[in-house]
Amino acid sequence: MARLRNDNAAALIPDRTRELAEIADWYRRALADEPARRWNTGPTLIGPTWKRGADGGWLLPEHTLGWDFLAWCGYWLRDSKARTPWKWTLEQARFWLWFYALDDEGRPLHDNAVLQRLKGWGKDPMAAGGAVASCFAPLTFDHWDPRTGEPVGREEPNAWVQVCAVSQEQTKNTMKLLPGLIPMETRRHYGIQLGKLNMYALGDSRQIEAVTSSPLALEGGRPTFLIRNETQNWNSSNGGHDMDGVLSGNAAKSADGVNAKMLDICNAYRDGEDSVAQRVREAWEGTQGDPDSPDKGLRPKYMDFGLLYDSIEAAPDTPMTEESIPKVIADVRGAGPVGFLILLGLQFLQIVVAFIPGEVVQIAAGMLYGPWLGALIILLGCVVSSAFIFALVHKLGAPFVQSMVPTKYLEKFRAFEKTGKLNIVVFILFLIPGLPKDTFTYLVPLTDMNMRTFLLLSNIGRIPGILVSTYAADGLIDGRFAESAILFAVAAVIAVLGIVFQKRIMKFLEMRSHRDK
């Protein structure tokens, strides 16, 4: 997959076309090597996404612009949680390949599609990624490559994407993913401006907007891509039927040479509610006759109206529960367990050997895993390394510590111990940035403080500093430069003050301890 790029992307990646091709090839290989799935139950699988050929491999469309879609996403989008280039699951990749499939004349096989999955499957990321890619990826057929015979797409210069729902909260579930999905280099390249309910790019010629307004206000629009979210909730009581009529009409008014596409993303509908999802499903089922029928039997011949219906459903005799439906393929994040262990190892070495500043490792954690998971990894590393040092000092004794730590520090800790205020002193010393925490980690085990108390006090004291570093680092990745700069500046000032006034702080604690005694 594409490597994570930075502001120097142009220098690091001289051949964008080549890397896009490599991403597409990665999906080709992965799909070719994907083993047959083992199901916990025998679900009903609907759609070409689930069909396999005579050789047992996936049946993929002969012609599709979906490879360009997958490559564009891998190059220009990012998994904000994993801090890696965006990677669709193979199940999702197959859907997109069929969604952008073409016939022999270069015409789309499917103008409309329904993607029905269990709640929690990842439909909102599908919508968000699909919306952004449809604005910029070459997904409108242009010509056939004379060398390979493959379809060549072009960008839609006036791409207009509408994310539609009957409530603003439903559209927010999709729109709020865009800031984390679109890295800064992509925003700069396309001139992207993000709002809470819209996105503009390339001089406002490309846009994504959340649509929840009155159907009358929507009438007359000519969007190039419609994403209709949670259509199982669209009914007459909330204006869903009216919106369905207007949006379907707008999609049919495509400009010359532009095929407007519409994607419904939904959960299973509730029978009897007459939702848009139910109406679409029943209409689609009415076209699913026997393709070989001569129209003389009870079942009519199969009729294809260009609707791609894709669904995983429980078999009729299977209860509709999460346990009855197989787990979907999870997104690969970062380097997986290996990346986690590498960062954990760096944090361990940072405290045990102290060859790099702790803030460096904390910033790396925030950039790679975000503020909360990154902080958790750092804190876990602190706990493990502190426990290791504590046990090591207990085994080797004072001579080992004296060979590494100045005697003056050891004497001060002995004095703190005698005052009975050692607990408070340890907490404050690990709380204030700029103080030699790693040195203190070797000294405390020589006192009467037990390991449990030390680990609790020291690591609670570390938490504010760790969170500031990981949160500020995360801000750099997400483009919150001003916010990150302020946090780094405040942390740096406090750290400098801690270093400059280190002796005074130690003296103050010593005097305070004696006074309280």
Image: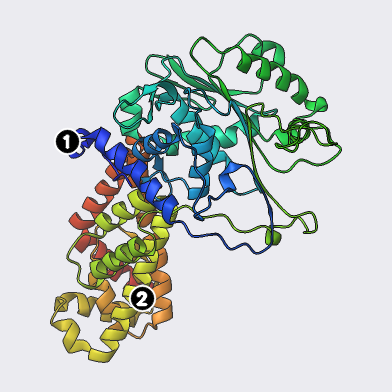
Residue tagged by mark 1? Answer: 11
Looking at the rendering, which quadrant does residue 25 occupy? top left
Image spot of residue 175 (x, y percent): 53, 32
Image spot of residue 80 (x, y percent): 42, 44
Depth check: 195 or 410 in front? Answer: 195
User: At numbered mark 1, what does the secondary structure look like: helix, strand or loop?
Assistant: helix
The amino acid type found where label 1 is placed reads Ala
Depth check: 291 or 11 in front? Answer: 291
Looking at the rendering, which quadrant does residue 306 occupy? top right
Image spot of residue 454 (x, y percent): 38, 76
Image spot of residue 483 (x, y percent): 36, 37
Against 141, residue 56 (above or below) is: below
Precedes in sequence: disc 1 or disc 2: 1
Residue at (71% x, 37% y) in the render: 292
Q: Residues within 10 Å of mark 1 (few under 14, many from 20)?
A: few
Residue at (29% x, 88% y) in the render: 394
Residue at (30% x, 32% y) in the render: 185
Residue tagged by mark 2? Answer: 422
User: At numbered mark 2, what does the secondary structure look like: helix, strand or loop?
Assistant: helix
Do the numbered discs 1 and 2 sit on residues whose CB atoms are within 8 Å?
no
**Is 437 displayed left or right of 309 in the figure?**
left
The quadrant of the rendering that contains the C terminus is bottom left
Instruction: Mark yes or no: residue 424 visible.
Output: no
The amino acid type found where label 2 is placed reads Leu
Residue at (48% x, 43% y) in the render: 93
Q: Residues within 10 Å of mark 2 (few under 14, many from 20)?
A: many
Between the C-alphas of marks 1 and 2, the distance is 54 Å
**Is 149 displayed left or right of 34 in the figure?**
left
